[in-house]
């Protein structure tokens, strides 16, 4: 019971500022202190979301955006896991791959957009590819540094047991680099959400990013703010999901977070 | 149980490591390898454990079937896998730990940690973690248990407790052990035989048989005689630079 109370109070503290901000915003809009064609009241935004939910268009936009992020995230993470593990574990492979990957990394990822559009057209493949590229680098960098940071002393324990390379990777290196991997996929997911906006801004007929463009073209700020809110909620939601996975799988860590 | 013949392992241009080391360890014997730092005693143990290869000479470990031993090494630090429970750490050497939980129970009660099977390493004190490491090394049933300065990172009191624990284990299981240490008292308290190493690269300067029956008293006056002897060997070899090899 005490635990529940404690968690509620922590949650409550976090709510104070957002609620205060909403109240001020709503009040200012009602009193006419801010122009409604620039910044409509929160209630107007909520109503527009409810309207879209009722006529069924909301689900379409949300699901296509989620789908793009998910597929791009999976492809980017899988590629980073395979290449990152090899680069982290085999010195030769690092010498071969790392320079070119670092060179690619220094290209701002959005610069790829025109090229991807040219190669793959305006359909799904170009969007998913862009997101995958965005997700790849943070995951890759964290996996490599995670694997290279594994304590040699622990690896020696495995060697004393005559473990094969595969067993070493599976039983020592991967679990030991898991914290770093999870940090990587969380920041990768964050970038995934950033890139889906870019992809959808540049050419889409559906999706939350498309709603942003639509709102701008039809001078309806409530649509833009609704879309921003939905992005925030989805981004926060998916991140919380990964955070849960992280907390559960890293209970063994002797760190500040687990001490509280 | 273990036979080493003219083994050498040199590095840093022949100024570190060990040279022409020969000795045997009998079944059920506790042998101490004693020496000042830099005499190659830890390197010798790493070669025995298979972590490193010797440059020359032969090393024969294992039982009558000649099977290579695996896993029976205790390091200066516990080196537990922080993501595994104490029990799973003890069973770390097994392909399928789930099938051997009874074994983990046996060795954990042997080291006095039966109630901590499900704990994580982060909840253990230094002494408890090292006990877990001992249980892990025993669980793989090594022909020779190798210990590399196993208690040097612990406080004096815990150290004495664990030395007694090691003797209890020896009483019960008659485990063959090779202990590398720089602590003369520890060597005299635990070992049936002490190999004194000195020089750079290290050679075996002397071999002492400790005839006092175990368990011994830490303040046994007879042990001080051995202590004097070891001191004079270490100092003598230090003075003459090149050690005489008394076998």
Image (spheres, rainbow, N blue to C red):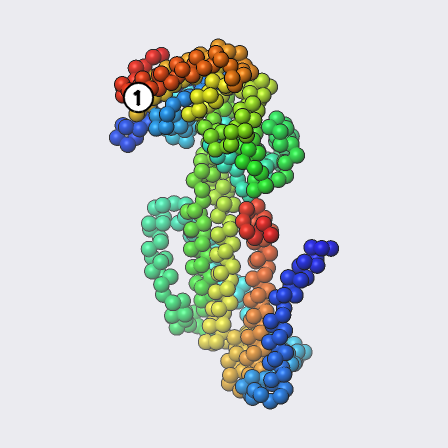
The image shows residue B86 at horizontal and vertical percentages of: 59, 37
Outermost residue toward the top in this view:
B211
**Pointer 1 residue:** B238
Which residue is depicted at the point 47% across and 72% down?
A: A199
Between B187 and B223, the one nearer to me in the picture: B223
The image shows residue B121 at horizontal and vertical percentages of: 56, 40
Which residue is depicted at the point 67% across and 62% down?
A: A9
Which residue is depicted at the point 30% across and 21% down?
A: B238
The image shows residue B24 at horizontal and vertical percentages of: 42, 15
Query: Which of the 4 image quadrants contains residue B126?
Result: top right
Q: What chain does badge 1 belong to?
A: B
Mark 1 Cα within 10 Å, few/some/many (few <14, many 20+)? some
Callout 1: SS: helix
Does B116 sit left or right of A186 as displayed? right
Between A22 and A45, the one nearer to me in the picture: A22
Image quadrant holding the C terminus of chain B, namely top left
Between B1 and A96, the one nearer to me in the picture: B1
């Amino acid at each position: 019971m005490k635990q529940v109370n404690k968690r509620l109070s922590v949650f409550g503290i976090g709510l104070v500022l957002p609620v205060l901000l909403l109240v001020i915003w709503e009040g200012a809009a009602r009193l006419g202190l801010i122009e409604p064609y620039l910044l409509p009241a929160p209630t107007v935004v909520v109503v527009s979301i409810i309207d879209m939910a009722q006529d069924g268009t909301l689900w379409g936009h949300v699901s296509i955006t989620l789908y793009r992020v998910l597929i791009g995230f999976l492809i980017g993470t899988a590629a980073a896991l395979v290449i990152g593990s090899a680069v982290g574990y085999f010195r030769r492979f690092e010498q071969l791959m790392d320079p070119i990957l670092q060179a690619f990394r220094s290209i701002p990822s959005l610069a790829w957009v025109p090229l991807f559009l040219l190669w793959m057209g305006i359909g799904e493949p170009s969007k998913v590819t862009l997101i995958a590229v965005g997700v790849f680098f943070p995951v890759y960098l964290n996996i490599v540094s995670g694997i290279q940071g594994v304590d040699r002393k622990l690896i020696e324990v495995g060697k004393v047991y005559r473990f094969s390379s595969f067993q070493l990777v599976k039983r020592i290196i991967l679990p030991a680099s898991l914290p770093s991997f999870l940090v990587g996929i969380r920041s990768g997911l964050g970038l995934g959400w950033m890139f889906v906006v870019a992809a959808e801004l540049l050419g889409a007929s559906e999706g939350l990013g498309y709603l942003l463009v639509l709102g701008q073209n039809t001078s309806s700020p409530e649509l833009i703010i609704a879309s921003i809110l939905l992005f925030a909620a989805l981004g926060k939601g998916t991140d919380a999901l990964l955070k849960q996975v992280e907390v559960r799988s890293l209970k063994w860590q002797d760190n500040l977070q687990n001490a509280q | 149980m273990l036979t080493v013949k003219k083994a050498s392992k040199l590095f840093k241009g022949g100024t570190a490591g060990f040279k022409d080391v020969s000795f045997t360890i009998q079944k059920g014997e506790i042998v101490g390898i004693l020496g000042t730092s830099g005499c190659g005693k830890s390197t010798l143990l790493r070669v025995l454990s298979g972590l490193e290869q010797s440059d020359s000479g032969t090393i024969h470990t294992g039982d009558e079937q000649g099977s290579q031993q695996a896993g029976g090494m205790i390091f200066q630090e516990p080196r537990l896998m922080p993501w595994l429970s104490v029990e799973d750490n003890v069973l770390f050497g097994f392909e399928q730990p789930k099938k051997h939980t009874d074994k983990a129970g046996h060795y954990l009660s042997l080291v006095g940690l039966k109630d901590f099977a499900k704990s994580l390493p982060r909840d253990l004190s230094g002494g408890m973690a090292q006990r877990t490491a001992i249980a892990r090394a025993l669980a793989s049933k090594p022909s020779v248990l190798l210990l590399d300065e196993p208690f040097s990172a612990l406080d004096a009191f815990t150290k004495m407790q664990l030395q007694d624990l090691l003797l209890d284990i020896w009483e019960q299981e008659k485990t063959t052990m090779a202990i590398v240490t720089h602590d003369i008292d520890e060597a005299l308290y635990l070992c049936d035989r002490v190999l004194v190493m000195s020089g750079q690269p290290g050679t075996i300067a002397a071999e002492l048989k400790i005839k006092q029956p175990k368990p011994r008293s830490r303040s046994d006056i007879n042990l001080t005689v051995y202590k004097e002897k070891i001191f004079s060997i270490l100092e003598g070899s230090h003075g003459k630079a090149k050690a005489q090899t008394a076998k």
